[in-house]
Image (cartoon, rainbow, N blue to C red):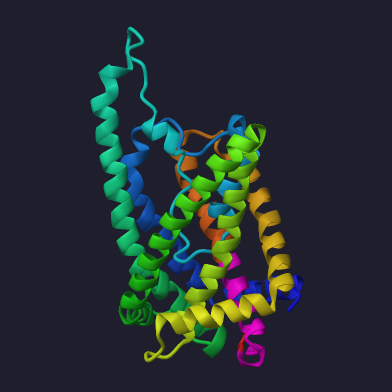
């Protein structure tokens, strides 16, 4: 499937089933309400043009170019939460207690959203699957049914993913230390390669989630991972073209988001997440169409 056809099919699906956008917007609002206490500690929650760098772009691609499910959340500027602010005499120790309390809030919110996402991820993917494959309008009953049915499988997948990320972080850390000692001037470049690897890996992981939603109740997690590995390895070049197109859209959306970030906080804190959610919803539906094409199921698609 060509990139233009993939995007065209996504547009047709969202136009025919606007409920997918409605569900996405509800999830965005829900997730941002959960994160609202975090916004109260900062003047701006979105990095500005001054933060522009290659490493920064890779970090933001995770928000604006990766078609995740559920399409919610906010590209928070974590540094604004955790960086101690100097007191009247320039002594940051006056605010260390407040900084620690903020860190606890961030940790608690992150854990809660992680658990909630285990339910929401298959729930939203399920109604996307029903719209594309069976021509069914999104229904709350189907949404909750998919979330309940696939909760344990996605829990296992997310936990396995957490362990894998932890081990890979250690591995990349050791590699960075070794190569940094040999090529000290290239330390930043090594870090950028780590972000690039993570971004490419994310596209493989979303295919695993698609396989879990499409598979039968008797399928094992390892079966879905195996099918994803075969599918991605067989279509490496085509998937890389999809990734490149998503990156281009992500760059454009980041720039637009930075412009919106110049607006007052009361406006930008709502506009930017909506922009993010609409873009990632479109990309998620696009990639699901591509998934069907790569699975030789294109004829089964309704749109």
Tell me residue 66's x, y (percent).
57, 60
Drawn side of residue 65 relative to residue 129, left or right = right
Instruction: Answer yes or no: is residue 12 visible.
Output: no
Is residue 288 highlighted in magenta? yes
Drawn side of residue 149 relative to residue 131, left or right = left
Front in this rendered view, residue 296 or 4: 296
Examine the rendered structure and indicate whether residue 261 appears above or below residue 143. above
Tell me residue 88's x, y (percent).
32, 9
Q: Magenta segment, principal secondary structure?
A: helix
Residue at point 52% right, 81% down? 226
Examine the rendered structure and indicate whether residue 5 appears above or below residue 72. below
Quarter of the figure with the C terminus: bottom right
Q: Residue furthest top?
A: 89
Residue at point 46% right, 34% down? 44
The magenta stretch is 283-300
Is residue 149 highlighted in magenta? no
Instruction: Answer yes or no: is residue 203 visible.
Output: yes
Tell me residue 255's x, y (percent).
65, 43
Instruction: Classify residue 179 by image quadrant.
Output: top right
Drawn side of residue 119 relative to residue 47, left or right = left
Quarter of the figure with the N terminus: bottom right
Residue at point 35% right, 57% down? 30
Tell me residue 97's x, y (percent).
23, 27
């Amino acid at each position: 499937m060509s990139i233009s056809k993939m995007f065209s099919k996504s547009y047709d699906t969202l136009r025919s089933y606007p409920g997918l956008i409605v569900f996405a917007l509800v999830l965005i609002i829900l997730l941002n309400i959960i994160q609202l206490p975090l916004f109260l500690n900062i003047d701006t929650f979105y990095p500005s043009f001054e933060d522009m760098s290659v490493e920064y772009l890779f970090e933001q691609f995770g928000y604006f170019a990766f078609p995740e499910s559920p399409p919610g959340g906010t590209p928070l500027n974590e540094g604004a939460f955790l960086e101690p602010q100097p007191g009247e005499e320039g002594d940051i120790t006056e605010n260390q207690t407040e900084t620690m309390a903020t860190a606890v809030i961030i940790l608690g919110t992150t854990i809660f959203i992680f658990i909630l996402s285990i339910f929401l991820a298959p729930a939203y993917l399920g109604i996307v699957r029903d719209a594309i494959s069976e021509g069914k309008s999104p229904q709350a009953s189907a949404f909750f049914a998919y979330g309940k049915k696939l909760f344990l499988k996605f829990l296992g997948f997310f936990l396995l993913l957490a362990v894998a990320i932890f081990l890979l972080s250690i591995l990349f850390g050791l590699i960075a230390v070794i190569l940094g000692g040999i090529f000290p001037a290239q330390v930043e470049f090594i870090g950028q390669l780590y972000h690039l690897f993570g971004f490419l890996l994310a596209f493989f992981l979303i295919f695993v989630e698609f396989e879990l939603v499409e598979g039968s109740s008797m399928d094992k997690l390892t079966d879905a991972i195996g099918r994803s590995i075969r599918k991605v390895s067989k279509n490496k070049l085509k998937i890389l073209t999809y990734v490149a197109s998503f990156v281009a859209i992500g760059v454009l959306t980041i720039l637009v988001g930075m412009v919106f970030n110049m607006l007052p906080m009361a406006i930008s804190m709502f506009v930017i997440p909506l922009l993010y959610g609409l873009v990632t919803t479109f990309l998620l539906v696009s990639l699901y169409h591509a998934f069907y094409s790569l699975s030789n199921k294109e004829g089964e698609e309704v749109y």
